[in-house]
Amino acid sequence: MSKTKYRVGIIGCGSIGTRYATAFQQLGDRAEVVAVCDIFEEKVNTLAEQFEIPSAYTDMQQMLAKERLAIVGVTTHNREHVEPTIAAAEAGAKAILCEKPMALNMRDADRVIETCERSGTKLAIDHTMRFEPNWRRVKQMVDDGAIGDLLHIEVQSYGDTSTLLHNGTHSCDAIRWFGGDPEWVIATVDRSNERERVTSFFGLNDGVTALFMTGGHWDYRLDGCFILEGSEGKIEVRPHRGWQPLIRLWKQDDGLGDFREGEQIEAIGSEIIGESTGDVPSEGAGEMVACLDEDRESISSGDDGRVALEMCLAAYESERLGRVRVTFPLAQKESPLELMLQSGQLPYIPAREYGWELG
């Protein structure tokens, strides 16, 4: 039986939009990028020409009205994810893959969720660890009891990727994915040298705790590590430029309480769309097709993205209120970061707020 070839449109034609176009193109007869859109005509024409995409637009509403899109990728700047996502859902898109963060405050995140629920649109947030087969392998190991009962998670993400709201949602989503829903957080935020450093300590359900440290220097390749500590061992994951992690399993010596190194687990290729491309966005594209084929929600759903955003915002709220313990659900619906910037409690970082200029 033949399978549907889904019509895809991309909003935002910068570097991430280019990755999305590559990813959907690699799906062959399962997806076709039929239209792209960007407010900058040169960008949209360049991307359309590079991938031989038939239609290029500078007006998002015009593209959504004309193209009968099944899947829409939203790859605009961080500040501009909300309105394109809502517009695509209201225009009848069956599935949307939106870059993180899904919004910059909880009020807007809820608007996105509610719109997609009304329209029946399957919303996914591109938190790539959930798609990447090596991270899924680690998750399965933990679920299977490879380190006993999970007790603590430590995330060190020191590579400078601007503010917590730029790449921090990746780590917060992973913390929740492995450790469960957050119950409270205490955090500190420092911007004393035009870089943001955040230390957050989360309490998760079932008694698991998580320490998340981010920011501090410019080289994203020095991207820290992700450690899962259990009652019988620990797993250490050191990402290599984000996509191919180095995974080590440590087991506890009987009677000594010390850890001995066990096995080093080799990275594996893609399990969603076939041969690995070395670029996680291709996994997200395959996930969108699978969601429509199987009529299911994404493994990185809008609700998942909402909680990851909430964790980041709660860390800022802890700092705003005097580095106090903040409980979930977060009562503050506006952005605590914006409130601190407006009041002067935190300095604005010129040209770096909310991430790099990714387009």
Image: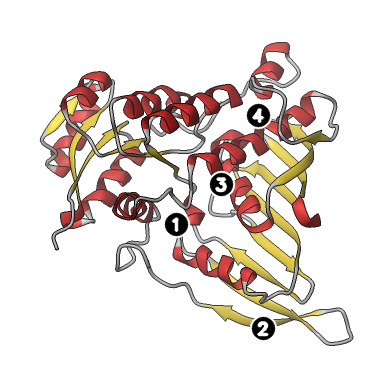
Q: Secondary structure at mark 1?
A: loop
> Crowding near pointer 1: few (<14 within 10 Å), some, many (20+)?
many
The answer to which of marks 4 and 1 sits earlier in the sequence is 1
The residue depicted at 21 percent of the width and 36 percent of the height is: 47
Q: Quadrant of residue 311?
A: top right
* Closest to the observer, 289 or 285: 289
SS of the residue at dot 2?
strand
User: Which kind of residue does numbered mark 3 sit on?
Assistant: His
Please tell me whether residue 287 is drawn above or below residue 199 in the rendered image: below
Spot occupied by residue 103 in the image (x, y as percentages of width and height): 52, 28
* Residue lying farthest to the bottom in this orientation: 254
- Picture coordinates of residue 88 (x, y %)? 32, 28
Q: Which mark is residue 131?
A: 1
Q: How packed is label 2: few (under 14 Cα within 10 Å), some, or many (20 or more)?
A: some
Q: Quadrant of the C terminus?
A: top left
| Residue bearing the label numbered 3 | 170
Secondary structure state at the residue bearing disc 3: helix
Where's residue 323, x and y in %? 84, 31
Which quadrant is the N terminus positioned in?
A: bottom left
Q: What numbered label is drawn on residue 194?
A: 4
With 334 as the anchor, is 44 left or right in this view?
left
Residue 352 appears in the rendering: no
Residue type marked 2: Gly
